[in-house]
Amino acid sequence: MRQITIKKSVKTSGIGLHSGKKVNLEFHPAPENTGIVFRRVDKNHFPIKADISYVSKLAYATNLTKDKVSIATTEHLLATLRGLGIDNIYVDIDAEETPIMDGSASAFVYLLKEAGIKKQRAEKKYLRIKKPKHYLNGDRRISIYPYDGFKITYTIEFDHPLIRRQTRTLELKSDDDFENEVSPARTFGFLKDVEMLRKNGLALGGSLENAIVIDSDKILNGHLRFSDEFVRHKILDVIGDLALLGYPILGHVVAYKAGHEIHTSLAREIKKDPESYEIVNAGELDFIAKEDKAIQVAEELA
């Protein structure tokens, strides 16, 4: 299995969820072993690699900062790149926050599929979990366990009649799994919190067009895309946050009432313990070799 970039450059624009500012975004192919690199075009193309070492403020989003230059609300975009298996890409942006689009990752999936997939010569690399790692903060917790694949079990619990407790386990075996089961799930918030958030300079671009807004007894903007859309969106978030480890992960993530701070804290715990993981080439993994062979046979029979 080889590394992947995109075939051609594509662009879009939108509004930052928290800043409320218009932003233009462009995706460009990148060489092998580049990883995911944001470039602030309004700051002389200043590069910020998607890496856990650059995580800064974590107020309702995952933000990256290098030398006082920031990229905010990166999680949905990073989840899309990881979910579609894209290893190397330049993400050019002319403002400090990625566009929220409709609050999900679907628009990014559509755009990147339009760009197309290009296989590169270098072999794909994975971060394989070798021993369990845990992070707890009160009753909020997250763990990751060794597993031949990438699986997430997530539980949320809210004292609200429209949410309560939701649990979902998803294994991402292909980009179709991400596209169909995760990417449409939108971010959500409570109407009672909107005024507080805006007083603190957050959610200035939020609207019924880009988030599920929940009142005391109803959803203000129509029906849900999934009966458990709320927990699916948390799965989307954790995929994006753990993408900051720099490689696709082989492991089983188990989270309870977590969020960006908890997700990224686990990533830090993994990164600072070299004995907990190893970076492996796809060719070293028997189960991936078997999957590749099955795909090759299917293609030959088609």
Image (cartoon, rainbow, N blue to C red):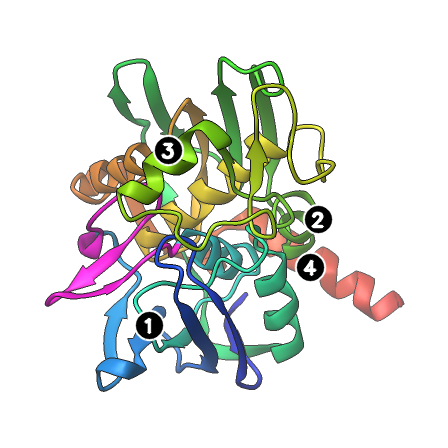
Per the model, the C-alpha gap separating discs 4 and 1 is 44 Å
Of pointers 3 and 2, the one earlier in the residue sequence? 2
Which residue is the site of mark 4?
Answer: 293
Per the model, the C-alpha gap separating discs 4 and 2 is 24 Å
Amino acid marked by disc 2: Asn
Q: In which quadrant of the rendered image does the N terminus lie?
A: bottom right
Q: Which mark's residue is nearer the viewer, 4 or 3?
A: 3
Labels 4 and 2 touching (C-beta < 8 A): no
Q: Which mark's residue is nearer the viewer, 4 or 2?
A: 2
Look at the numbered disc 1 and give the secondary structure of its residue: loop
Labels 2 and 1 touching (C-beta < 8 A): no
Q: Relative to residue 125, is residue 178 drawn left or right?
A: right
Residue 130 visible in the displayed image = no
Check residue 95 in the rendering and tell me which mark sits there, or answer none.
Answer: 1
Residue drawn at point x = 55 percent, y = 60 percent:
101
Amino acid marked by disc 3: Gly
Q: What type of secondary structure mainly makes up the magenta span?
A: loop
Per the model, the C-alpha gap separating discs 3 and 1 is 25 Å
For disc 3, the neighbor class at 10 Å (few under 14, some 14 to 19, many from 20) is many
Residue 27 visible in the displayed image = yes
x%, y% of residue 234? Answer: 49, 36
For disc 4, the neighbor class at 10 Å (few under 14, some 14 to 19, many from 20) is few
Which residue is the site of mark 3?
Answer: 259
Amino acid marked by disc 4: Lys
Q: Relative to residue 142, is residue 186 drawn left or right?
A: right
Q: Which mark's residue is nearer the viewer, 4 or 1?
A: 1
Which residue is the site of mark 2?
Answer: 180
Q: Please tell me whether residue 55 belongs to the stretch shown in magenta.
A: yes
Per the model, the C-alpha gap separating discs 2 and 1 is 30 Å
